[in-house]
Amino acid sequence: MKKISLMVLLLLSQTTLAAENLIILSLDGLRWQEVFQGADRQLIDDERYSEDSQALASEFWREDVKERRETLMPFFWDTLATQGVFIGDRSRNSRMRVSNPWYFSYPGYNELLTGKADPEINSNKKVPNNNITFLEWLNHKPDYAGKVAAFGSWDVFPYIINTERTSVPVNAGFMDATGKPLSMKEAYLNELQAQTPSPWATVRLDVFTFNFALEYLKREQPRVVYISLGETDDFAHDGEYDQYLRAAHRSDAMIRQLWDFLQSHDAYRNNTNLLLTSDHGRGKTPEDWQHHASAEAVKTYMEALGETFPNGIEGSETTWFAAIGPDIKPLGNFTPEQEITLSQVLPTALTTLDETPKSMNPDMDTAITEVLR
Ligand SMILES: [Zn+2]
């Protein structure tokens, strides 16, 4: 009897997913076009959008699309794409979009972090979220309590995650690292953050967000971390295609550093899934690539944008997904039969933790089971 039940246990353990840790990382408004095709020649050559088109071309333009995309995001292509899976390359008919009706950030992050679009969330204002994110939900469970954290470049994240209600630590905007004792690096990052000029009032440079997250992983060994990088979106809004590309390139290097750290650490090695996505797309042409909004959004909330783009920004509903880790099938490109949605990232993530998405929210969308082992 004992032998049989042991065998049953063994069989069962083979069908459950393996990794105990989860990292979701998003790159704000990074288009699928750059992720899967590399730099865009038209935008490189457009003198409105870079300081030096020639220099930018030598940095990121390659005739061959494989070389070009690998030049922009080497970790994505040499490691993630070969050992993991990606969705959203529309040139291969792999399609993914947001399911909220607005195509901008707060609605997108709510969709990502709750697993369900909420059409009522219709602005980027600092309003505490009525919905519960997975961070808050997991933090209530004994297995995860105190082992969940979030890091963001945008100062609206404390509201999206609702730190009035949840005790999940959220370091976002221009917040310092807190806790005792801080690592030497954290203390130094706090100093540098106070001394470094920021291009934007509500978004900090990703170097701080990323390194605060990395140091926290080393110091506290959380099981679940959400990281939101923001430079790609803000440089795009500013019309700086050169800086947008460099931000994507730096973000890719940060993700490599993160993955190398995870794979070097006893608690995380082969025990952590890393999921990447973006909160919305952007326009497709030199006239509209800077922006992102649905027709409904420009009609209702964005008068200035609506004057030029009454039909919204076509393409800003598109997004993409990529993942690597012990529970992820190494499929490379995956073309789902139907277009998948941003809201499916969270149920996929929860499934890798052996959590039941519907027990967090019965209305949550379904996991992308095809990419899971
Ligand atoms: Zn955004």
Image (tube, helix red, strand yellow):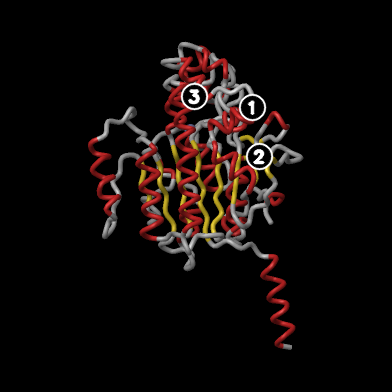
Is ligand 1 within 8 Å of the beta carbon of the residue shown at mark 1?
no
- Proximity of marks 2 and 1: CB atoms separated by less than 8 Å: no
Relative depth, front residue between 221 and 159:
221
In terms of image quadrants, where is residue 270? bottom right
Lower position in the chain sequence, tag 2 or tag 1: 1
What amino acid is found at the position of numbered circle 3 in the picture? Glu
Lower position in the chain sequence, tag 2 or tag 3: 3
Relative depth, front residue between 355 and 38:
38
SS type, badge 3: helix
The residue labelled by disc 1 is 65
What amino acid is found at the position of numbered circle 1 in the picture? Val
How far apart marks 2 and 1 lie (CA) works out to 17 Å
The residue labelled by disc 2 is 87
Lower position in the chain sequence, tag 1 or tag 3: 3
Question: Where the N terminus falls, by quadrant?
Answer: bottom right
How far apart marks 1 and 3 lie (CA) works out to 14 Å
How far apart marks 2 and 3 lie (CA) works out to 26 Å
Which label was assigned to residue 59? 3
Q: Position of residue 135 (x, y in %)?
A: 47, 54
**In this rendering, the label closer to the viewer, 2 or 1:** 1
Q: Position of residue 252 (x, y in %)?
A: 50, 38
